Image (cartoon, rainbow, N blue to C red):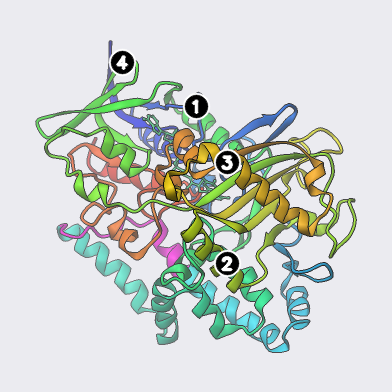
Amino acid sequence: MAHTGYDAVICGAGHNGLACAAYLAAAGKRVCVVEKRTVAGGAAVTEEFHPGFRNSTASYTVSLLHPKVIRDLRLVEHGLRIVERPFANFLPLSDTDSLQVGGGLEATQREIARYSKRDAECLPQYYARLERVADVLRGLLLETPPNVGGGLHDLFNAWKSGRKLNALPMEAKRDVLDLFTMSAGEWLDRWFESEPIKACFGFDSVVGNFGSPYSPGSAYVLLHHVFGEVNGKKGTWGHAIGGMGAIATAMRKEAEARGVEIRLGNGVARVLASRGRATGVVLEDGTEILARCVVSNAHPRVMAGWLAGVAEFPQEPFAHYQSESATLRMNVALSELPDFTCKPGKHLQPHHQSGIIFAPSLDYMDRAYASAREHGWSKAPVVEILIPSTVDDSLAPAGKHVASLFCQHFRYALPDERSWDDERDAAADAVIDLVTGYAPNFKAAVLGRRVLTPLDLERQFGLVGGDIFHGKLTLNQLFSARPILGHGNYRMPLAGLYLCGSGAHPGGGVTGVPGHNAAREILRDGN
Ligand SMILES: Cc1cc2nc3c(=O)[nH]c(=O)nc-3n(C[C@H](O)[C@H](O)[C@H](O)COP(=O)(O)OP(=O)(O)OC[C@H]3O[C@@H](n4cnc5c(N)ncnc54)[C@H](O)[C@@H]3O)c2cc1C
């Protein structure tokens, strides 16, 4: 059966697909969104994982969601509320020592001065220099990257981007160059001498990035995590009440209010093409949806799979597209809060409301990476825990808690033909044991858990290779080269086919930006 008359069919109801649909509908377009899963939101979703316990399933903390998207899509009016955490991070370091970062510059300086007075003094300048480069990145977010091989319009775009960079003082230009190319470890070694503070800042460089903090390019991943804001406070991370699904739910409400049709539980099997142009899609059950343009919200390699056999579509560059994060994601239902040896007490304290990082030094992270390269996953992994129920009582029964654990480095492909289906529980146990080493009541407090290995992320969310960002955030896959050189402007190598997901500029994260920008380009083409 064929459904016709649409201006656009959007393949995937991830938050970027929903955002793109809402922007197109606002311009009067007739839009149909088709989604494989039975729930909208993609990696921004809240689900019950243990009876009575709900949590964000994949992404778990918010900062990068663009303020323009929040405003344009009326997300606050649709119920979205984002709360800040009292402290950004808490790092248990030993049985007696920990580092707490956040709560204002002076408080952080006082804390850091316990390790190095010099580091505490450097901190304001470090923040200012990083912020200046983050501002450059912010200035590029809503821009369509100039397309390599494009025409006058792209030359103008290139000139506009270049002009912004050129206006910076030389010191900032050098910082831009360094942060886009260097390793986070080398960048941080320049600024600080104490290991705990380098670990706290360096953690961002390995999140979703299978690499050492000393791998070239990891400084960019660090930067990618600081361009956001929460309630106007730049660089901070917060919690969406109700979990990350609240973001997608608010977007969905706005999209539907604007007339978007959303069909769940029936994925795209292939893209229809005629005379070198995308004309619609065939769903898994054989339904055809015909539209003036086809917009993929899915991972670029998933999209390429829908075009197998379409002669005009070049498969090779997509086959080479790099996609692996090496992360394991776990939710646990807890009977009580972790009682840290270094900061005792099961009663709610500010450190329970922080991003709790288990990785005391950059060397530790480097070893976690090396061990995953050798064994497939690290027995001493890098782990962050957030306990969102400490700031949101809608997620767990009274007195109980839910925790999000985000764990690096767990490779997608295990050596010696080992399978994640056999090792899922062993890996999850290793993570729980690691936390229990710092908080002895943790293991016994776990009432239930849901574990997502990289293979599960691929199977359940279509994240090829388990890549949380829809492809590595490396220089060869950023800006004009995202997802591939020659197609950095949301237009894919088939007329009428667009990309609106995280595989497009500016890459991964719950930002809404690829959806926003892609809609603009689709409208610009007169679809
Ligand atoms: C474990 C994990 C932790 C993360 N943590 C954070 C975090 O804390 N903060 C943050 O900002 N970002 C985080 N991220 C990254 C962020 O979640 C993603 O970059 C972002 O949600 C991607 O949004 P998207 O709309 O581009 O794509 P997706 O959310 O991936 O949506 C794509 C949609 O396409 C659908 N699809 C796939 N195949 C088909 C098909 N054949 N037919 C129809 N539909 C299909 C998928 O089911 C999905 O709904 C995390 C990601 C993961 C996986």
Furthest residue in direction left, as rendered: 275
Q: Amino acid at mark 3?
A: Arg
- Please say if 39 is above or below 351: above
Residue at 20% over, 60% down: 148
- Which of pointers 1 and 2 lies earlier in the amino acid sequence? 1
Return the residue at label 3.
424
Based on the displayed image, in which of its 4 quarters is residue 505 positioned? Answer: bottom left
Crowdedness of circle 4 by 10 Å Cα count: few (<14), some, many (20+)? some
- Inter-mark Cα distance, 3 to 1: 41 Å
Q: Which residue is mark 4?
A: 287
Q: Position of residue 193 (x, y in %)?
A: 63, 85
Q: Amino acid at mark 1?
A: Ala
Give the residue drawn at x 45%, y 28%.
258
Q: Is 56 included in the stretch rendered in magenta?
A: no
Q: What's the CA distance linking mark 3 and mark 2?
A: 21 Å
Circle 3 — which element? helix
Q: Is residue 485 visible in the rendered structure shown here? A: yes
